[in-house]
Image (tube, rainbow, N blue to C red):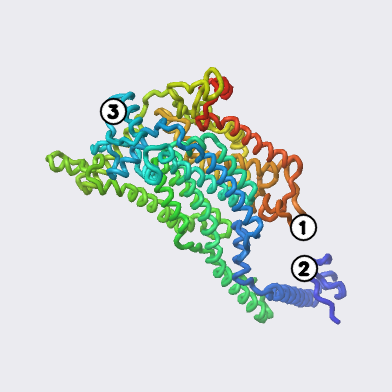
């Protein structure tokens, strides 16, 4: 049997050791030797080319991958599971059971004794009465009062069911109507003469936001345990709790932004799955063409007197494909439009989450190897994302003013028409009167918000919010409760909008870890959480010159909780680095061990609760960290509960909770 021809990588340089001595080794000077040398070298080259062609033919005979195989490969690059892969029923059940349990706890904490205090507190004097006016008139009517004492008398009559102070003249209000319409739901269900009616909508929205955050964390971290921890921490936070038990607007703003955040996360997975699905057939066709072209080239006979040029594979097609209508971004646009309809600060979430969606599309197209990934991301990713998100949010916001448009008696509704009827010049005369009036009203609101500089004893610079250095007092009755109310010589009753110190103070160093993981580790989950800070916290530094309060921080408390949960998951090993990343912080000695590939035993239910694949075995140190954070937060919540829910306590008890002078 003839031995195979040697390849060019053999030790002897590819020459046949059995061949006779090369003529070039003979003494020079012979014409016949030179001719023989050329002949033998030409023969050797043909032999080598034949071997190369044979190897190439062997290589190209490997059939091209199927479309499904390519799609699964693309999905792996994009951080998605394989086609048809579903979550095991056990972690799926844990992923709902844990969040529902902490949501039930949150609902109890927010609904119990909701009627107390029995009078309007803090800014309820504005929003509850405006909500009642919307139900009665269809717009915000005025409740005229000359001073604070008269306003207190109006509030007292309102709480007793006497609404005669409401007049049909429109009131100048500086926030849109969505939040007040949501408050009005509780008034319709339970009446406007009791605290349960005033605060019911805030309590329900607060409890629902706990469920939504827990489910968001489970999706982000791939762990029902971390999702449950995140929901629990939000449920027992003082800022979130007090504003869920008080009829203010900020809790509704927080809720709708969180809904938008959830939709943007869902869009990330959905758009990547669709991108892989639409790209796979194109890549399969490319591989098939390359396979057949290489096979044809290998089968062609070589010309005897000329070396064959190496076959050049066809340039692969890497044109990007669109992903169709991004319905999750449309949903995010609706949610964020409603957020803007509560307070204008929702517009920052539209901008930041829009940039986040574009950045994720950019990274996805680069990950799958598109040739002009930046241009394609702009044309096929960024522009469709913008169209799905921004116009939807804008139209939703405009639609939220439907009641204002429908009622001629609303504030400034007839402003442009009245100027035109009086023969006075109308600014922007090219606009329809209704739109011109609406726009001028917005200009007036902008001037108010940007120029608000009245001094207040509880104003706080935004830099102090993340440390909760100056909480806002929502309730402190002028008359102290009688001694029998608390069993002490002097009693106190208060609602202090103070965040859970364990959560907020631990989240400050956790934020540093999160920043490192986002920048060095390129962890998309860290960037998503930071986007929440960027949308709902950082813009306030641009308005630090005006009067601002720390209770605005409820809008970004979900991302504070996610930040702390992320770092707890990293420290305990429950959180895995995303695929295709480097620079991710290596977990310390508390990291949990993972099952090796040789293990054949099935994961326990507890393991499936800790992570979706049940691959984690927590070390004692990991358990200690996880349980310590949760236990300390729960103890702190129990400690401050009386001051979050206006329970009568002794003055000394209240004073013992004022750890910092700025808390008083």
Q: Quadrant of residue 545?
A: top left
Q: CA distance from mark 3 to mark 2?
A: 99 Å
Residue sitting nearer the eye, 3 or 140: 140
Where residue 642 sits in the image (x, y, percent)?
A: 55, 30
Q: Residue at x 53, y 52 (%)?
A: 265
Q: Residues within 10 Å of mark 2 (few under 14, many from 20)?
A: few
Q: Is residue 407 above or below residue 116?
A: below
Q: Nearer the viewer, mark 1 or mark 2?
A: 1
Residue at the spot of label 1:
597
Residue sitting nearer the eye, 396 or 166: 166
Where residue 302 sits in the image (x, y, percent)?
A: 67, 79
Going from N to C along the chain, the mark reached first, 1 or 3, is 3
Q: CA distance from mark 1 to mark 2?
A: 40 Å
Q: Residues within 10 Å of mark 1 (few under 14, many from 20)?
A: few
Count of picture labels:
3
- Is disc 1 placed on a helix, strand or loop? loop
Residue at the spot of label 2:
8
Where residue 409 sits in the image (x, y, percent)?
A: 23, 42
Q: Which mark is residue 145?
A: 3
- Is disc 3 placed on a helix, strand or loop? loop
């Amino acid at each position: 049997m003839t031995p195979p021809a040697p390849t060019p990588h053999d030790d002897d340089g590819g020459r046949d050791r059995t061949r006779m001595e090369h003529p070039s080794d003979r003494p020079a000077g012979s014409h016949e030797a030179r001719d023989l040398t050329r002949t033998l070298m030409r023969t050797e080259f043909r032999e080598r080319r034949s071997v190369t062609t044979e190897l190439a033919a062997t290589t190209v005979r490997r059939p091209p991958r199927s479309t499904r195989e390519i799609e699964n490969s693309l999905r792996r690059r994009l951080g998605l599971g394989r086609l048809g892969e579903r979550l095991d029923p056990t972690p799926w059940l844990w992923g709902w059971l844990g969040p529902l349990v902490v949501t039930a706890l949150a609902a109890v904490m927010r609904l119990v004794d909701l009627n107390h205090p029995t009078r309007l507190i803090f800014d309820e004097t504005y929003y509850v009465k405006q909500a009642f006016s919307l139900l009665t008139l269809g717009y915000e009517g005025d409740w005229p009062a000359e001073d604070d004492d008269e306003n207190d008398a109006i509030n007292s009559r309102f709480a007793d069911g006497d609404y005669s102070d409401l007049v049909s003249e429109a009131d100048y209000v500086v926030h849109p109507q969505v939040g007040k319409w949501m408050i009005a739901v509780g008034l319709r269900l339970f009446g406007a003469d009791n605290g349960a009616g005033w605060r019911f909508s805030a309590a329900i929205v607060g409890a629902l936001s706990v469920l939504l955050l827990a489910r968001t964390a489970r999706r982000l971290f791939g762990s029902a345990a971390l999702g449950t921890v995140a929901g629990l921490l939000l449920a027992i936070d003082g800022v979130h709790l007090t504003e869920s038990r008080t009829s203010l607007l900020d809790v509704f703003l927080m809720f709708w932004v969180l809904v938008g955040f959830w939709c943007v996360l869902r869009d990330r997975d959905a758009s990547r799955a669709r991108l892989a699905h639409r790209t796979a057939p194109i890549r399969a066709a490319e591989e098939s063409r390359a396979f057949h072209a290489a096979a044809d080239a290998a089968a062609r006979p070589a010309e005897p007197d000329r070396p064959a040029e190496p076959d050049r594979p066809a340039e692969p097609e890497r044109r990007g494909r669109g992903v169709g209508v991004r319905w999750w971004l449309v949903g995010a646009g609706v949610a964020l439009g409603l957020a803007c309809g509560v307070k204008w600060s929702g517009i920052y979430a539209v901008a930041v989450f829009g940039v986040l969606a574009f950045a994720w599309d950019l990274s996805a197209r680069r990950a799958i190897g598109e040739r002009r990934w930046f241009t394609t991301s702009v044309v096929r990713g960024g522009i469709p994302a913008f169209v799905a998100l921004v116009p939807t949010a804008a139209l939703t916001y405009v639609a939220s003013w439907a009641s204002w448009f429908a009622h001629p008696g609303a504030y400034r509704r007839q402003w442009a028409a009245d100027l035109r009827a009086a023969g006075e010049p109308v600014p922007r005369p090219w606009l329809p009167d209704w739109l011109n009036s609406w726009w001028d009203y917005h200009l007036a609101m902008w001037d108010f918000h940007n120029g608000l500089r009245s001094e207040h004893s509880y104003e706080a610079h935004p830099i102090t919010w993340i440390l909760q250095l100056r909480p806002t007092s929502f309730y402190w009755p002028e008359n102290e409760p009688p001694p029998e109310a608390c069993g002490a010589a002097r009693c106190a009753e208060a609602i202090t909008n103070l965040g859970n110190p364990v959560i907020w103070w631990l989240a400050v160093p956790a934020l540093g870890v999160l920043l490192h993981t986002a920048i060095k580790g390129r962890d998309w989950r860290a960037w998503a959480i930071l986007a929440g800070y960027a949308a709902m916290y950082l813009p306030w530094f641009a308005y630090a010159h005006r009067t601002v309060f720390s209770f605005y921080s409820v809008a970004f408390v979900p991302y504070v909780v996610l930040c702390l949960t992320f770092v707890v998951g990293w420290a305990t090993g429950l959180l895995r680095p995303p695929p295709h990343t480097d620079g991710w912080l290596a977990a310390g000695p508390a990291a949990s061990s993972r099952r090796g590939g040789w293990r054949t035993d099935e994961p326990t239910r507890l393991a499936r609760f800790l992570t979706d694949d049940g691959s984690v075995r927590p070390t004692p140190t990991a358990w200690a960290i996880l349980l310590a954070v949760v236990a300390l937060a729960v103890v702190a919540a129990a400690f401050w509960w009386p001051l979050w829910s206006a329970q009568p306590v002794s003055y000394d008890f209240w004073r013992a909770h004022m750890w910092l002078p700025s808390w008083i």
